[in-house]
Image (spheres, rainbow, N blue to C red):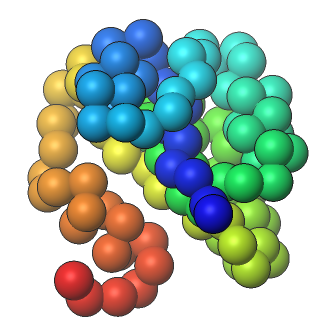
Amino acid sequence: MKNIYIIGDMHTVSAFRLSGIEGVVSGRDSASARLEEVIGKGDAGIVVITNDLAEDLQVRITEINLESLSTVVIEVPGIDDTRGFRRSVVGYIAEALGIAL
């Protein structure tokens, strides 16, 4: 069974953990290593990462999304992001997968 993971700041990860999603707290300096750590587990179906951490990882995120048959990486705003959520997390997942829910 594949799992959902969140990589982000402490507040965002804590909020996702309340819904049962496993999370990894990270700053920009360690985001690449945390992403590789989660992908390396082999059980990640969806990896949600906050926009601020994803900014420096666009090439790697694109590689994962194009080459992996079992994992997709989705960018979402963090809790402290001033732009906020434009839609639900399910909406972000549907957009990343290219499907309508």
Q: Quadrant of residue 17?
A: top left
**For residue 2, above or below residue 4:** below
Q: Nearer the viewer, residue 93 or 30?
A: 93
Give the residue furthest to the front. 1
Q: Residue 81 sits in which quadrant?
A: top left
Left of 92 or right of it: where is 41?
Answer: right
For this rendering, which residue is in front, 4 or 66? Answer: 4
- Where does the image place residue 23, in percent across and percent down from the top left? 52, 28
Q: Residue at x 22, y 83 (%)?
A: 101
Question: In the shown orientation, is residue 37 left or right of residue 21?
Answer: right
Measured as percent of width and height from the top left, residue 88 is found at 16, 55
Total label count? 0
Q: Residue at x 65, y 37 (%)?
A: 56
Relative side of 61 to 32, left or right: left
| Residue 45 percent coordinates (x, y) | 61, 62
The single residue placed furthest to the right in the displayed view is: 40
At x 80%, y 34%, the residue is: 37
Q: Is residue 47 visible?
A: yes
Could you tell me which quadrant the N terminus lies in? bottom right
User: Residue 36's image quarter?
Assistant: top right
Any part of residue 62 in sight: no
| Residue 18 screen position, x and y as percent | 28, 26
Above-or-below relation of 9 to 71? above
| Residue drawn at 41 percent across, 85 percent down | 98
